[in-house]
């Protein structure tokens, strides 16, 4: 992949996308572990019933991911100037458009690894400055390249982990859109919540930010319509006021977000990143000797706390 | 509600929100906020707990930028007045 990136950069977008898809085919054949994870996830989710169909979908998903990388590397060309208006069609309820038009209003935007989430966030930044919580891509060369290509003026990244504690709330207070991907395995930091009917360790940050800051929360998806063409769709605002039962509040909000994400995935499952081990910790059961760690939601039943207490 | 009462009730909120193994009985107005080790998520737990316990909606900056628990208690007393 690393050695192919300069070549991908030099080609026209359609040709680069085709080359990326061919490389994805090769990677799909060679990377047995990721292939198995993707096929297993598709079967667990009930998106396909048999292994052969799941394998075909997993390969389509790998090709899609290659296109996401190519388009993200070319995002400055795709979205620069006023070109974003042609590349991205925008769908949002009037209430959300009003929030986007209000420079003082912060907006929480939850999304998943569906469509081209990178292009979606960059396109959204044309309507409201975007702060995206990001973790590093596992391949450091791809990570560096992707970070270099982000537009700087209305789009910035903050670390998902180990950053200043106010980095998320400050963004909302500044009237920015805070973009969070909600479908990564949360390990010990989340709650177990059903995703496609199976428990998955789910990050609680989006829900807690909504409960505490009262910032409007929407679900977003950016579907690829073709080479260099996208549709960015924002849901109606999700509103949930604190009831005093924090875990119930968090579960209610995340349940709605997961429902929105599942529905969007079902519309076009090949555009979802199935190779992530989404259910790894959700289906983890503590062996004898493990007890829940105190603090956060770990005090409540159902939280995931895979750490040993001595 | 005086500051002593706020501190007592705040102790429970902070302890419930923390993942740190601290001696919470030693919490005082002189305790530094930094020493409580809150991160971006546990600070939200603190704010949720304060809203439920005291009916006060504080901004994260109200808590993060403070140096000591005593300053937080003073902010809360002012808001509650």
Image: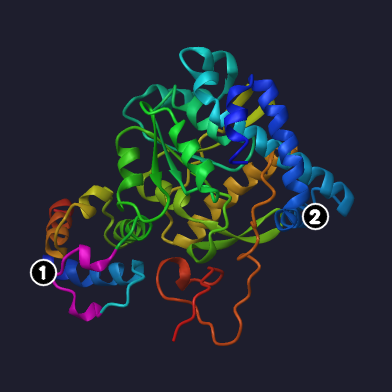
Question: At x 31% / y 53%, what residue is drawn?
Answer: A165
In x, y percent, where is residue A65?
Answer: 66, 39
Q: Is residue A226 visible?
A: no
> Which residue bears the numbered disc 1?
B30
Q: Are marks 2 and 1 on the same chain?
A: no
Q: Is residue B23 left or right of residue A54?
A: left
In x, y percent, where is residue A250?
Answer: 49, 56
Q: Quadrant of residue A22?
A: top right
> Which residue bears the numbered disc 2?
A43
In x, y percent, where is residue A177?
Answer: 41, 34
Q: Range of the magenta residues?
A: B23-37
Q: Is residue A236 above or below residue A226?
A: below
Q: Main secondary structure of the magenta part?
A: loop
Question: At x 15% / y 61%, what residue is drawn?
Answer: B73
Chain on which label 1 sits: B
Report the Cα–Cα distance between label 2 and label 1.
56 Å
Chain on which label 2 sits: A
Number of numbered labels in the structure image: 2
Q: Is residue B25 magenta?
A: yes
Question: At x 48% / y 55%, what residue is drawn?
Answer: A204
Q: Is residue A31 magenta?
A: no
Q: Is residue A187 left or right of residue A26?
A: left
Crowding around mark 2 (Cα neighbors within 10 Å: few <14, some 14 to 19, many 20+) is some
């Amino acid at each position: 992949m690393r050695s192919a990136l300069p070549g991908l950069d030099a080609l026209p977008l359609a040709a680069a996308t085709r080359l990326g898809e061919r490389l994805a085919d090769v990677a799909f054949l060679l990377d047995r572990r990721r292939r198995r994870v993707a096929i297993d996830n598709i079967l667990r989710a009930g998106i396909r019933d048999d292994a052969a169909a799941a394998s075909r979908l997993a390969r389509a998903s790998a090709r899609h991911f290659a296109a996401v990388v190519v388009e993200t590397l070319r995002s400055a060309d795709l979205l620069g100037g006023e070109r974003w208006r042609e590349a991205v069609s925008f769908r949002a309820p009037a209430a959300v458009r009003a929030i986007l038009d209000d420079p003082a209003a912060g907006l929480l935007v939850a999304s998943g690894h569906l469509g081209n989430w990178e292009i979606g966030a960059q396109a959204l930044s044309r309507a409201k400055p975007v702060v995206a919580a990001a973790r590093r891509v596992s391949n450091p060369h791809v990570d560096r390249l992707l970070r270099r290509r982000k537009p700087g003026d209305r789009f910035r990244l903050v670390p998902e982990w180990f950053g200043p504690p106010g980095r998320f709330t400050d963004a909302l207070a500044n009237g920015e859109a805070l973009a969070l991907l909600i479908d990564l395995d949360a390990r010990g930091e989340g709650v177990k919540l059903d995703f496609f009917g199976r428990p998955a360790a789910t990050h609680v940050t989006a829900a807690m930010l909504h409960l505490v800051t009262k910032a409007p929360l929407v679900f977003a998806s950016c579907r690829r319509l073709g080479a260099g063409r996208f549709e960015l769709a924002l849901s109606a605002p999700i509103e949930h006021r604190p009831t005093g039962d924090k875990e119930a509040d968090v579960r209610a909000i995340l349940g709605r977000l997961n429902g929105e994400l599942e529905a969007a995935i079902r519309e076009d499952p090949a555009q979802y990143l199935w190779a992530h081990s989404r259910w790894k910790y959700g289906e983890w059961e503590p062996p004898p000797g493990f007890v829940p760690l105190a603090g956060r939601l770990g005090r409540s039943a159902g939280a995931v706390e895979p750490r040993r207490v001595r | 509600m005086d500051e002593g009462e706020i501190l007592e009730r705040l102790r429970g909120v902070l302890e419930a929100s923390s993942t740190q193994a601290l001696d919470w009985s030693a919490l005082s107005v002189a305790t530094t906020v930094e020493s409580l080790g809150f991160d971006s998520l546990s600070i939200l737990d603190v704010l949720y707990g304060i809203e439920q316990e005291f009916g006060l909606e504080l901004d994260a900056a109200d808590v993060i930028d403070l140096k000591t628990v005593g300053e937080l208690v003073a902010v809360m007393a002012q808001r509650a007045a």
